[in-house]
Image (spheres, rainbow, N blue to C red):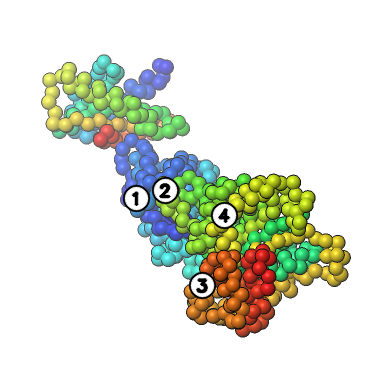
Amino acid sequence: MRAKDAVGRYGENVAAHHLVQAGWDVVDRNWRGASGEVDIVALEGDELVVVEVKTRRGTGFGYPAEAVTAAKLARLRRLAAQWLDAHDLHPRGVRIDVIAVVLPRQGSAQVEHLRGVVR
Amino acid sequence: MSLGRTFAVSLVGLTGHLVEVEAHLAASLPAFTLVGLPDASLAEARDRVRAAVSSSGMPWPNRRITVNLSPAALPKAGASFDLAIAVATLAAAGICDPASTSLAVHLGELGLDGRLRPVRGVLPAVAAAVAAGHPRVVVPTANADEARLVPGARVVGASTLAEVAHSYGAEVEVPTVLPVIQVHETVRPVHVPDLGEVIGQRAARWAIEVAAAGGHHLLMVGPPGAGKTMLAARLPGLLPDLDEAAAVEVTAVHSVAGTFEAGDGLLRRPPFEDPHHTATPAAVVGGGSGLPRPGAASRAHRGVLFMDEAPEFSPRVLQTLRQPLEHGEMVIHRAGGTARYPARFQLVLAANPCPCGRAVGKGLECTCSALARRRYFSRLSGPLLDRVDVQLEVLPVSRADRLDGGAPETSASVAARVARARAVAAERLVGTPWTTNAEVPGSWLRAHAAPGPGHRDLERALDSGLLSLRGVDRVLKVAWTLADLAGCDRPGREQVGQALLLRTRGQVGA
């Protein structure tokens, strides 16, 4: 269990770094709402983005992004609303992104950013 | 490039429609959606295609994949779209060259191991592709022979998805595998029985010859064991080979039905279908979920449909035959669309005279009540029997018949006479859409081939109510066939008399 959590934590750091590099403003991390946890909340310009980070050490059991199910997306939508409720921030729009991180045995982490996965 | 496209063919009955298969890749959560009215077996293509691409050693695009089958309003069925879906997806992913995939038509079902499996209906599908201006066709190896029967098609046979992808520039190793071979649902008998095996039955042999020469429908009534089934099974052996157009039609029907071996080329012999009397209307007419498959009546197109123990068939089955008898085609309406299959068959009915089967001659041994006897035969309705030109009683073979010396005539010599008579008829009918006497409508007969002196006998039969007006036309048709067989230039009194005899089961003599 601990190894798995460590991988997840490391992946989130990689993702946050990726967003900062891209010029985004990370406003919150690992925020707990009533129905779960949001990995990263960031602002791209004046659009609020709820980011789900999925990390895997290999693709033997499929790509990380494939593990984001419809149920998980529905929960992220609810969490986005709860986060907005709890904070005094008024973005022009809200969307949900997925960042898939693959950590190979050697070499650097591969980051794939899927934008606007819920339409 | 995130868009790939190629072509496939959707079959509705024997009509093929060219279908454009487009695949679009979007950077979103990985998903695979298939749109464009797929049926259940086609929707399952998603899982087959995905497994086949992975098994072939190519990366599955980690994207949101949308495959569209256009025209989107046309319902599509079957597994033959697998290959086109896979190729379009690989082209969209940039693994295959999108410019070259969009030039070809792809047909074939994929196995999970990436091998290509044969599909039904390749002949009409390839013909439709060529007609639509897409002569380049990729088919499974097992279907390649069948596809090459279509003139003008440039056929490429492939055993695996990797082989197809490689030909479009994919960097993939082509495995050497044993191609999947065609497995047929029915094994067709190669042996056609010979008329020389039938002992006695001179009258019945003659009637069969007349039926074969004119393409007339035939009813045989007789006790069990008299040889009705034997005689019927020998009718196809008397018929001439199919001409080019008929052979293509027949082969296309059998290709869709999945009962066709392409190794020997087009089907050139008239088919023989003998559905069991428990057959349902769907089995005879054609049916199945989504788009219907041809039934026994269509598989007997340009051949013989033999219904043994005809009164035992359900009345609905017998009634459904009236449409093809009249129009020569089956129109099947289902939710998925309307399918048309040709069904211009020669109907051969065999029946016992009563439930116990012994009401022949004086009928002294028959144990059936008069009511049972009447009910039994009334199953063959008037409208159906009215369309049967040649009707005869097949009596049990007597000892005298059996000892009647000399070997019975063989199919070959009878077939030669039949071919001569058919040639005479075809020459007379040149310039018309018909080739046999049975197809000619009564109006044409009366206008172009007025009967000779035998006409008075016909008038008398009409006056006494024994024949309907249509019956008169039908007797005339048979009389023309008899004249063709006898080498007369028009039917005389003798031919009309014999035709009347054949039509009325001996109730009116010559």
Q: What's the amino acid at mark 2?
A: Gly
**Front residue of B474 and B82:** B474
**Front residue of B345 and B39:** B345
- x and y, in percent, of residue A37 in the image: 28, 19
Residue assigned mark 1: B72
Residue assigned mark 3: B442
- In the structure shown, which secondary structural element does the residue marked by tag 2 occupy? loop
Query: Going by the picture, which residue comes out furthest to the front?
Result: B464
Residue assigned mark 2: B336
Labels 3 and 1 share a subunit: yes
Tell me the quarter of the picture where residue B208 sits.
bottom right
- In the structure shown, which secondary structural element does the residue marked by tag 4 occupy? loop
Residue at (38, 58) in percent of width and height: B102
CA gap between label 3 and label 1 equals 46 Å
Tell me the quarter of the picture where residue B392 sits.
bottom right
Residue at (56, 69) in percent of width and height: B463
Q: What's the amino acid at mark 1?
A: Ala
Q: In front: mark 3 or mark 1?
A: 3
Residue at (38, 32) in percent of width and height: A66
Q: Describe residue A24's horizontal placement relative to residue B499 as left or right.
A: left
Q: Describe residue B352's horizontal placement relative to residue A112 as left or right.
A: right
Label 3 Cα neighbours within 10 Å, binned few <14 / some 14-19 / many ≥20: some
